[in-house]
Structure formats: C-alpha cells, structure tokens
Image: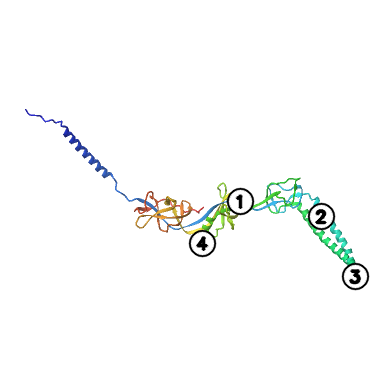
Amino acid sequence: MQCVKNQNNPVQWVLLFMALLGGFLLSACDSQNQAQPQHQMPHVAFVTIQPEKVTLSTKLPGRTAAYRVAEIRPQVNGLIQQCLFIEGAEIETGKVLYQIEAAPFETALNTAKAALERAEASLPSVRSRAERYHDLLATQVLSQQDYDDATAALNQVEADIQYWKAALQTARINLGYTKVTAPISGRIGKSNVTVGAIVTAYQPTPMATIQQLDPIYVDMQQSTTDLLRWRKHLQDGRLQQGAEHNKVKLILEDATEYPLEGMLQFSDVSVDPTTGSVTLRALFPNPEGMLLPGMFVNAIIQEGFNDQAILVPQQGVARNPSGHPYALVVDAESKAILRPLTLDRAIGNKWLVSDGLNAGDRVIVEGQLLLRPGTTVEASPFQGDAKPPAAAK
C-alpha cells in the first residue's frame, strides 16, 4: 500500500512566505532609491552695486522760541491808574501799556524846577560881590577872609545850579516812567496787575510779557556723536555741501510739513553735560502766527550730498549673533562670500554702506537663508522693483 505525501507541509509554507517578504522589501528599497532627488545647486538672486547720488539729511527734535521777548516791569514806584491794552493783541513799539499815578512825580519836577530858578536868580549878585571883593583886596580895604567867603559863596551857588539841573532831569525821567510803554513790537500776553495795584521799581514779577513771533526761532538738540561724524564725513570727502545746506524744513506735531523753509543760524559753542548734545538754532518766517513759542517740532537739516554713495537693499543685509551686519556676495567663481559691513543709516528701503562693499559687487538678496559662506550657487539678477533712494531722514 503506497503512502500519500502530505501537501500541507508547514515548512514549505514558511519558506514560501519568507521568499515573498524578501522580494517585497527589495522592491520597496529600489523604489525609495529611485524617488530620492539628486543634490541640486542652490539658486540665489543678486543685485549689482552701483554708486548713486543721494542727499543726506538728519531729523532733530526741537522747540520753538520767540525771536525777542520783553518782560514789562515798572521803573518807578506807584499806583496803576490805567491799563491801556487788550490782552493777546499785537502791540507796536512805543505804545503806552500802563499809566502810573503821575502826581508825585510832577510835584518833584516842579520842586526841582523852582529850586533851580532860585539858584540861578541868586547867581548874578553873588558873582558881582566876588568880583568887587577881588578888586578891593588889591587896595587892602578888605581882608583876605572876606574875599575867600565871597568866592566860596559863588562856588556854592554854581554847584547848587548844577545839582538842581540834575535833579530836574531826574524828575523829568521819572515822570516819563509813569507811562509804561512797549519796548518791542509783538504779541502781548495777559496782564499780571490790575488798575489800583501798587507796583515797585524793577519788581521781580513782570507786569506783562511781549513776544515777537515773526520771525521765530527753532532750537534743536544734536548729539555730539552725530556732529563729529558729520564733520568727519565733510573732511574726508564723503559729503559735499551745496548752496542749500543751511536750509531747514519743519515737521509739526500733527506730522504735517510747515510750508515755509528756515535757515540755520548757528551751533552753540558748549555741550550740555547732562545730555551730551549741542544746541542748533534755525530762524523761520512766521507771518501767519502758526508757530507759537514752546511748540514741539522736528527739524530736517540738509547735511550735504554724496555722489558715490553705496546703497544695498535692506533684505540683503543680515546680522550675526553679535549684532554686526554682513552681506553675502557672489564672487567670480559663483561662490557665496561673507562681507562684514559698516552701515551709516537707512535711506528708504536701503542701507547706506560706509565700508564693506564696492562698486560692481553682486549682493545676494534672495535665497541667502541657511546659505553658508563658500557654497557654490546658481546666481541670477534680482527682478524686484527698484525704487530710487529717498533723502535720508
């Protein structure tokens, strides 16, 4: 009797399963290797640096100040009888502002005038007596003492005349001071005294204040660091000054531009030790009275212009962990080279570069993220919109 072979042998099934699993794994590995992309060269976009002409300016905070200020104080003691102006009005030079009671000063004037007339009236007789005594002294009719007394009396009368002339002039001046007049033209503020008040000569509190507002000053503060940098750039030729370098523009508190230009007057000769800044003063016309003393403004001062300015888009400048700026430049071998930069200021959407770049350099502005220096790149010109540089603020 023949034995029938068992077709359900477990070993055969295990070997068959392992063969199928191995084939599947090999197929998956081949597919993964075929799907993996080949290493490609990074693509970047660059801009070619070309020197440009830019006008440089700086914005400084400042405050307005009156062109002239006169604090009105009395020059004699007395009672205020009249106030002859409207508060806040425009005042002309010489206008009478206050009237101080004049009666005591008129009396003093009359007294000095009468005393002078009395002394002048006695002068002829005293002089004649001195002359007669001089003639009689030669004949020894009178003593020397009598002649000396007559001469002394003459000198006394002449001195009294000079004294009362001075007193009369002083009385006239004091009487004139009872009319308090405006020393300058301008706008007068509120009155600090009223009719019936007693005032004293040269009192510390002014009776009123007049300010001339057309033209008007603008005082600005500039740090000594910026001042030294500006002067250094002028000396080494980076900046040149044109005919309009003294002109100043003004930005008001509401961010609008003042319609009239001013002129830079002077720079202070001392530095404020608390702020390390120097005061600059500009003069602005103010015919409409738009500018009032004490207003906060921003002044834009023209520093000069640079014919060979190096500008680079801000997107092409990065900073290292220490905060120092740098840019990546495509060299002749199409490699990305790191260039440390020295930046001056921002002009629009670009940086003004003082050192680190030259004309003709190709600065990477796109694709530089995670790009390491020394990497070979595929570079093409940047196709972004190029906007002309604006004046530096």
Which structural element holds mark 1? strand
Front residue of 166/57: it is: 166
As displayed, is residue 12 above or below residue 70?
above
Mark 1 residue crowding within 10 angstroms, few (<14) / some (14–19) / many (20+):
many
Q: Mark 2 to mark 3: distance in Å?
A: 42 Å
- Residue type for callout 2: Leu
Task: Say which mark, if any, is on residue 109.
Answer: 2
Q: Closer to us: mark 4 or mark 3? A: 3
Residue placed under numbered mark 3 in the picture: 137
- Residue type for callout 4: Gln
As displayed, is residue 258 above or below residue 237?
above
Q: Earlier in the sequence, mark 2 or mark 4?
A: 2
Which structural element holds mark 4? helix
Q: Mark 2 to mark 4: distance in Å?
A: 67 Å
Q: Earlier in the sequence, mark 2 or mark 3?
A: 2
Residue placed under numbered mark 4 in the picture: 235
Say left or right for 43 vs 207.
left
Which structural element holds mark 3? helix
